[in-house]
Image: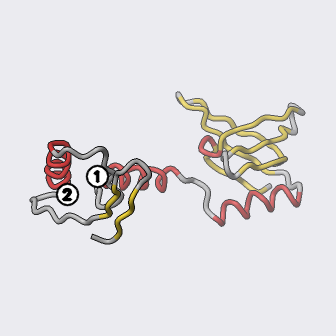
């Protein structure tokens, strides 16, 4: 028992650590919750030891890493195009077999949303495309 506090209404608050023998963390948690629910406790709070959802966290983390297209080299390359106002050709894959090849200038780049704002020099129009739609940057 680490600490005991008397509360205003005649209740006492204890901080304890409980060791439960079980084959897995989930089974130990199930046993602990069962025992706590069978007791006549006014309330309880489990503050540590819960190790559930690790597989979900691992797979979400791996998916986020795999989907992250933006590397430091690509980021600096795009920013270089913006600073130099260089004319480049971008190959865009719109899906379903539709590929576009645009002569353009990169006007803006939002790394958080992975969005490129492009000025199409032939059409004299501004477009916004997702970075994952861009197949290639060709320096002119």
- In x, y percent, where is residue 48? 33, 60
Q: Can you say which quadrant of the picture contains the N terminus? A: bottom left
Q: Can you say which quadrant of the picture contains the C terminus? A: bottom right
| Mark 2 secondary-structure assignment | helix
Asked whether disc 1 touches disc 2, contact meaning CB atoms under 8 Å apart, the reply is: yes
* Occupied quadrant, residue 16: bottom left
- In x, y percent, where is residue 78? 75, 57
The residue carrying pointer 2 sits among few (fewer than 14), some (14 to 19) or many (20 or more) residues within 10 Å by Cα, namely: some
Check disc 1 and report the residue beneath it: 52
**Colour setup of the view:** secondary structure
Q: Residue furthest bottom?
A: 2
Q: CA distance from mark 1 to mark 2?
A: 8 Å
Check disc 2 and report the residue beneath it: 25
Residue at 73% across / 62% down in the picture? 77
N-terminal label among 1 and 2: 2
State the count of labels: 2
Residue 18's disc is: none
Residue 104 versus residue 15 in the image, above or below: above
* Occupied quadrant, residue 130: top right
Residue at 31% across / 61% down in the picture? 14
Q: Nearer the viewer, residue 55 or 4?
A: 4
- In x, y percent, where is residue 104? 82, 44
Horizontal relation, residue 44 to residue 83: left or right: left
| Mark 1 secondary-structure assignment | loop
Q: Nearer the viewer, residue 110 or 84?
A: 110
- In x, y percent, where is residue 72? 65, 65
The residue carrying pointer 1 sits among few (fewer than 14), some (14 to 19) or many (20 or more) residues within 10 Å by Cα, namely: few
Q: Nearer the viewer, residue 63 or 102?
A: 63
């Amino acid at each position: 028992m680490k600490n005991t506090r008397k509360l205003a209404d005649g209740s006492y608050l204890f901080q304890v650590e409980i060791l439960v023998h079980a084959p897995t963390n989930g089974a130990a948690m199930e046993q602990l919750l069962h025992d706590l629910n069978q007791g006549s406790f006014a309330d309880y709070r489990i503050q540590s030891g819960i190790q559930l959802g690790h597989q979900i966290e691992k797979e979400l983390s791996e998916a986020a890493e795999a989907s992250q297209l933006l590397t430091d080299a690509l980021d600096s390359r795009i920013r270089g195009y913006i600073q130099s106002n260089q004319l480049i050709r971008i190959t865009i894959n719109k899906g379903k077999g539709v590929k576009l090849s645009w002569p353009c200038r990169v006007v803006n780049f939002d790394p958080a949303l992975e969005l490129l704002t492009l000025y199409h020099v032939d059409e004299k129009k501004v477009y916004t495309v997702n970075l994952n739609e861009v197949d290639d940057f060709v320096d002119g």
